[in-house]
Amino acid sequence: QVQLVESGGGSVQAGGSLRLSCNASGRAISTYFMAWFRQAPGKEREFVAVINWSSGGTYYVDSVKGRFTISRDNANNTMYLQMNNLQPEDTAVYYCAATPLSLRLGTTEADFGSWGQGTQVTVSS
């Protein structure tokens, strides 16, 4: 499995921006899908975005399209989530996750086997 460590969370006002980072180690990360999920208090963990580390292909949940950008830095084995125009409903613990490219890509928590510890994002109105 791959080990994942997130960083970059914090508190911002509505309309502000944050960039989350997820550093990966342990296995050949180029053979993985890597994703961001989030979990708000009292809610289930929700898919946000995913990137095919090999091809760079991306996919987003509709609620963040045009505001969030997922990207990767091959040299540093780091994935990013640039979040712009943040809104109070974006408040959650954000997790990075990974699953091998050899598996069917899904967007549920069960589809990913490796997880980071999470980082808190709080957006005030």
Image: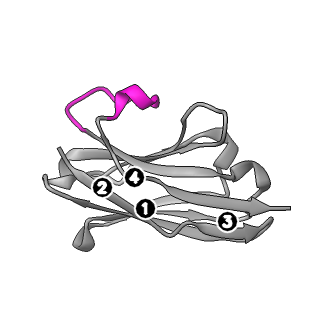
In the rendered image, residue 85, in percent from the top left (x then y), is placed at: 74, 64
> Of the residues tagged 4 and 2, which is closer to the observer?
4
Residue 71, disc: 1
Q: Which residue is mark 2?
A: 4
Residue type, numbered disc 2: Leu
Identity, as a three-letter code, of the amino acid under mark 3: Asn
Q: Nearer the viewer, mark 2 or mark 1?
A: 2
Residue 99 appears in which quarter of the rendering?
Answer: top left
Q: Quadrant of the C terminus?
A: bottom right
Category of crowding for the residue at label 1, using alpha-carbon neighbours closer than 10 angstroms: few (below 14), some (14–19), many (at least 20): many
Q: Amino acid at mark 4?
A: Gln
Residue annotated with mark 3: 84
Amino acid under disc 1: Ser
Does dot 2 land on a helix, a strand or a loop? strand
Quick one: label 3 or label 1, which is nearer the N terminus?
Answer: 1
Give the colouring mode of the picture. Answer: one colour
Q: CA distance from mark 4 to mark 2?
A: 8 Å
Image location of residue 107, percent across then percent down? 46, 31
Chain part drawn in magenta: 100-112
